[in-house]
Structure formats: C-alpha cells, structure tokens
Amino acid sequence: MSDAASHCTKARAAVDEAEVEGLIRGICFKTGPPRTVGVELEWLVHELRQPRLPVTSERLEAAFAAARATPLASALTVEPGGQLELSSPPAASLTECVRTVSADLDAVRAALRERGLGLAGIGHDPWHAPRRFLRRPRYDAMETSLDRTGPAGRAMMCASASVQVCLDAGYEEPGPLGHVRRWWLAHQLGAVLVAAFANSPMAGNRPTGWVSTRQLRWAQIGAGRAGAPVLDADPRGAWARRVLDAPVMCVRREDGPWDVPDGLTFREWTRSGTPRPPTPDDLDYHLTTLFPPVRPRGHLELRMIDAQPGDDGWIVPVAVTTALFDDPEAAETAYRTVKPLAERSLGRPAPHNPLWFDAARHGLADPELREAAAACFAAALAALPRLGATSEVTDAVAAYRDRYVVRGRCPADDLLDRLLGTDRTGSGPRPADELPLPYGKDLYR
C-alpha cells in the first residue's frame, strides 16, 4: 500500500484503451525461470511498557527517523496508520532472503527498542480503532474513495499488517512452473494460506467471529478494488481487463486536493478523457491502487497472509509458499491437492467466493482446508532441502505444522486463548479488557 510504483514508461502523452492493454500485458508478467524470492513484512508498532496504549505521532516520527538512519538492505516504508513495512530486495534463494531480512529486522528492532517501542506481528489491531498517521494526498484520496464502501477501508489502511511473498511469474511454457499454472495455483492455494496462517481474530477488544479479520476487511472493500480477475488460460488478458474495468481511485493534481471520481473506471477514463486524458504514468499509479490477493507486478505478489507472531514467525509462510511454487515436485503436489477445493469457489474470483470466506472465518477448523494444509506442509518440508533451506528454516516449518496444522489450529486460536481466556469446554470467552495486563504483553512477544 506504499507509494512505490510499477515500471511503466513515464511519458506524458495520453494513452488509449489498446495502449493501456498493451502496457499491462508487457509489464505485469515477466516470464522466465523462477530464480528470485522476496518478502514485504508489515508490522504494528506498539509501546513496550504499555502495549495497549496508542503510540503518539511524535513518538512514531522519531522512531521511524531512527530506523531510516540505520543501514538496511531492505526498503523501509510507513503505512497510513503508522505500520512499519520492510520490503526485501530480490534474493537468489530462500536462504539469502531470510538472512537479509532477519538482519534488517534485528537492526530496526534495536532502533525502536531504544525509544521504548516494539513490533507486533498481528494481522489486525485487536484494540485500537483505525487512525491515520500519514497525511498525504494519496491517502486522503484513498480514504475518501474507500469510505464509500463502508468502514472496512480505514481498517485495511490503518489497522492491518501482513506477510507478502513475492515470487517470479514463472516460465512462459506450460508445466508446474509455467506462469499460467502459477497464477491459477496462487488463487486456489491462497485460501489454504489464509486458513493456515490466520492471525487476526479480534477488533475493538472483541472477537469478530473470523480467524482472519484482516482478510474479511479486504473483502469488504469490494471486488472492484480488491478482487481478482476471473481465472482463464490467459492471465495477461484477464488482468488487463480487470485493470481497465477497475474504478479509478484518484486523479492526481499538482496543486490542491486530488480528484476522487465516483464509479469512473480506467476504461471509461481513456474513452472520455475527462477530467483530463490519462497518461502511462496515471496507469502506473492506478495499478498501485488495486489490492487483489495476488497482484502481478512483473512478479507475483501474494498478499493474503496475516502478519505472524514472534520475531521469526514470518519465515514459515515465506518458506512454505516458496517451496510450493518453486520446487517442481512440491508445486505439482500443491496443484493436485487444491484442485478439488476449487469447486468450492463456485467459479467466483478470489477473495469473494465461499472457499475464501470459509478460510477467513474458520481457518483450519474447516476439515478440507486442514487436510489440504497438511498435504501442502508435507510437500514443502520435502522440498525445502532441495531448495537449499537451512535446518533452522526446515525445523521452524516442522514445528509450525505440529503446533497448528496437525491440530487444525492457527495463530488466531492462540490469541483467543491467551487474550480472552477461551474455555472451549463451555464457559466461553471473557472481554479482553477484563484480563490482566500480562495477556496484553504476551500478545507482543
């Protein structure tokens, strides 16, 4: 959700509908051997001594300034609500990615710790109402646009955090590592990843009834902004149509507030040329305002995984996802495993279909998702040594499987047990504000 742009030509000449489709086809799927992996990690920032208190803007600004002054290999950005994001450079291997990001996180945590702040890996803030930290024209326009569909947009902007895994689009040719197969797999396996790594069961001090409230909020902002295209044999064409038919969030201006059209699609903008004709730069910007669960940016950006607990919890979803996409044997197993689940989507694009909603609501308590997750974790564990993963990474994946997948649980269940005193035998949960403070501290371990 940062201000980072794609790589369209920055020419100022207006573009027509055919040129837009050509640009999208050229920039969004760069095919070739899968060689690189990256990750974008979002974190909630909290007070170390009193985790439930909101951090003031002044303290956030000072902390981010200190973090930016720290030498990092990853890019450090700030999200609208003051969430901190680290975006790794493309790595030649999973091991290199983990090593680079772990070192950067250690440095960032040290800089924040000196100022009494820490990072929390939770998919949705369980206590604080969404509040804006950044005041920029982009986010003013985004807030205005998203408010038209209800309050979920502000929660998505200001109260959510994720682990986003970035992988190469794959070969042009067919096969388990071909870009058509990987595009399809990302949208079907995505529901399993939602369920296995769900870690956001609360908002406003209360359980929401969803193990991934973050995924619920993204779905609630609407298919126009956060929906995938219909899956077919031509991902480039499907994505181009999706981009052209998506609503324009804003028309930028050099002076004054940006225009926020209501219901204007990019296709209509190219045809009408009002309030001014769109340029390639406008298309470039439009692409950054679409938030589907899988976003093609030359590579594939998988955006459906909640932020994970613990200093190193993020490593497990990165390792599992990389193994299931980049190892041919594991990719084939994952494909065969999730293919029967696809029927539950009823042909509707993710995440607005029954399969994705069940994953976000029930997690691995859903028997079919639990069975699929178990098969996918087994395939990933077999593949990781072939990808050169360290024993520490493989052991972390195995421990996660034993703690959660085998038992049909996810980190959201731990949050509910710790924060609400959940009694599964009958007495039920207690409100979070009735629990002693140590439960709050446990949340941020």
Image: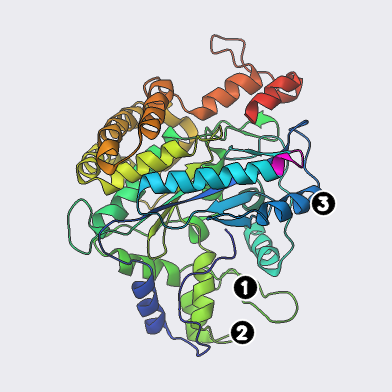
Q: Locate the C terminus and report the quarter of the image it occupies.
A: top right
Residue that appears at 69% across and 74% down: 258
Nearest the camera: 414 or 311? 311
In the image, residue 34 lies in the stretch drawn in magenta: no
Indicate the position of residue 122 as horizontal and vertical percent values: 59, 37
Q: Which residues are magenta?
A: 112-116
Residue 152 seen from this side: no
Task: Name the amino acid, label 2.
Answer: Pro
Residue that appears at 26% across and 63% down: 32
Residues at circles 2 and 1 in contact by the CB criterion of under 8 Å: yes
Please state if 115 lies on the left or on the right of 369 as rendered: right
Tell me the element at label 3: helix
Label ID, residue 275: 2
In the rendered image, which residue does mark 3 sit on?
Answer: 58
Residue that appears at 59% across and 51% down: 85
In the rendered image, which residue does mark 1 sit on?
Answer: 261
Tell me the element at label 1: loop
How many residues crowd around disc 1 within 10 Å: few (fewer than 14), some, or many (20 or more)?
Answer: some
